């Protein structure tokens, strides 16, 4: 299919309306058959559960054009499972995982002209979301729900690409123990917006949130997990019941161990230990890995030896290997690549 006349290399991480999207409604205790529609606008009751009590969740994944011209997605079964887990925590009906994958195929195929070409640096970002669309006034789950999935071509998440970022330890809490930090609920991201705005106004790219209970342990940023490299090249990542189980982070830890033959560890990471690390990065679907150059703390600035000019060597190998798997230049583990067209 002929591609859209888009300057792929100039795309930012922003919304562009594409051809069509998938919609399914939950009414009377069951999901309907779902359908592709052209209309991007959503019409709901003024008393919809999503508007009154923030009953909503979402996922994020990408479609890529591989080196051989195929269009694929990366581990979408895990997105389907995570959305199902999130929905249960918010008392919403889970959208069946096999139907999630079918909707994904339909959305990407209907918008193939918006899938950026191989080597452009851009991708097709896919956003599935589920929300309470039925009316509710008392504090309770909505009676009806809507599942939608749309896509949009995007460039890098952070302006400047993979340049190391300046972070700041936030004075705000992101998620409480036994709360909802481990699910991809819209409310979690709304809670991080104010703190993120404060960080940006002070010249920082992102926050580092610490655990709410002790304010001593590294958790995550407003929209990505952390990954660090020790001076002896061990790759470590924070372990906590209040951070999102990132698919990208899980994949990078596998790549570190099985492809790069590095020692890996998931454990609690005190902020006091971070200054001893040689590299740090933020990892997630949108950015894959964005290197950290420095972190402002109440006791001064932590500057990583990898510097402010480029990604450290281990993070670079992790990035190159994972993106190579996604783009088809490196053989993928079984089940990681979902072919669409």
Image: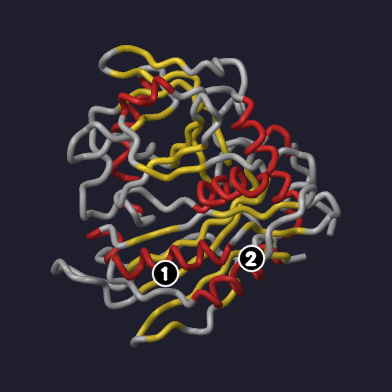
The answer to whether residue 197 is left or right of residue 104 is left
Looking at this view, name the residue that lies furthest to the left.
Answer: 138
Q: Where does the C terminus fall, quadrant-wise?
A: bottom right
Give residue 260's mark: none
Of residues 171 and 36, the one nearer the viewer is 171
Looking at this view, name the residue that lies furthest to the top.
Answer: 300
The answer to whether residue 250 is left or right of residue 91 is right
Q: Is residue 238 above or below residue 140?
A: above
Give the quadrant of residue 77.
Answer: bottom right
Q: Is residue 10 above or below residue 303?
A: below
Mark 2 or mark 1, earlier in chain: 1
Instruction: For residue 85, say whether it is visible.
Output: yes
Measuring from the top left, give residue 68's x and y in whole percent: 86, 54
Q: Residue at x 45, y 69 (%)?
A: 147
Measuring from the top left, give residue 201's x and y in whole percent: 36, 20
Determine the secondary structure under disc 1: helix
Q: Residue at x 37, y 83 (%)?
A: 27
Determine the secondary structure under disc 2: helix
Q: Where does the N terminus fall, quadrant-wise?
A: bottom right
Instruction: For residue 188, say whether it is visible.
Output: no
Measuring from the top left, give residue 114's x and y in whole percent: 71, 52
Total number of numbered labels? 2
Q: Residues within 10 Å of mark 2 (few under 14, many from 20)?
A: many
Q: Residues within 10 Å of mark 1 (few under 14, many from 20)?
A: many
Give the quadrant of residue 335.
Answer: bottom right
The answer to whether residue 48 is left or right of residue 167 is left
Q: CA distance from mark 2 to mark 1?
A: 19 Å
Closer to the eye: label 2 or 1: 1
Give residue 84's mark: 1
The residue beneath circle 2 is 107
Q: Residue at x 59, y 32 (%)?
A: 315
Q: Residue at x 31, y 28 (%)?
A: 271
């Amino acid at each position: 299919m002929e591609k859209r006349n888009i300057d792929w290399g100039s795309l930012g991480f922003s919304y562009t309306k594409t051809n069509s999207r998938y919609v399914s409604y939950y009414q009377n205790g069951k999901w309907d058959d779902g359908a592709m529609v052209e209309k991007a606008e959503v019409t709901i009751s003024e008393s919809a559960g999503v508007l009154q009590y923030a009953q909503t969740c979402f996922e994020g994944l990408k479609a890529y054009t591989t080196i051989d011209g195929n269009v694929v997605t990366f581990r979408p079964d895990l997105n389907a499972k995570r959305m199902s887990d999130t929905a249960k925590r918010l008392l919403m009906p889970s959208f069946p995982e096999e139907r999630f994958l079918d909707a994904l195929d339909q959305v990407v195929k209907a918008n193939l002209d918006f899938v950026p070409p191989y080597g452009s640096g851009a991708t097709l970002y896919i956003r599935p979301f589920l929300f309470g669309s039925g009316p509710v006034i008392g504090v309770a789950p909505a009676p009806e729900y809507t599942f939608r999935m749309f896509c949009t071509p995007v460039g890098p998440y952070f302006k400047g690409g993979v340049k190391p970022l300046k972070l700041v330890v936030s004075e705000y809490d992101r998620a409480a123990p036994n709360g909802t930090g481990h699910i991809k609920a819209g409310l979690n991201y709304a809670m991080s917006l104010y703190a993120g705005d404060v960080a940006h106004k002070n010249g920082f790219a992102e926050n580092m949130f610490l655990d709410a209970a002790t304010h001593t342990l590294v958790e995550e940023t407003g929209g990505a997990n952390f990954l660090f490299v020790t001076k002896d090249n061990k790759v470590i990542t924070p372990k906590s019941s209040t951070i999102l189980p990132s698919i990208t982070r899980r994949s990078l830890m596998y790549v570190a161990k099985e492809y790069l033959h590095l020692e890996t560890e998931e454990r609690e990471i005190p902020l006091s230990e971070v200054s001893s690390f040689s590299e740090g990065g933020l990892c997630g679907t949108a950015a894959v890995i964005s290197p950290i150059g420095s972190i402002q703390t109440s006791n001064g600035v932590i500057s990583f030896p990898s510097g402010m000019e480029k990604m450290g060597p281990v993070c670079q190998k992790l990035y190159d290997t994972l993106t190579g798997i996604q783009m088809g230049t490196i053989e993928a583990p079984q089940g990681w690549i979902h072919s669409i067209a």
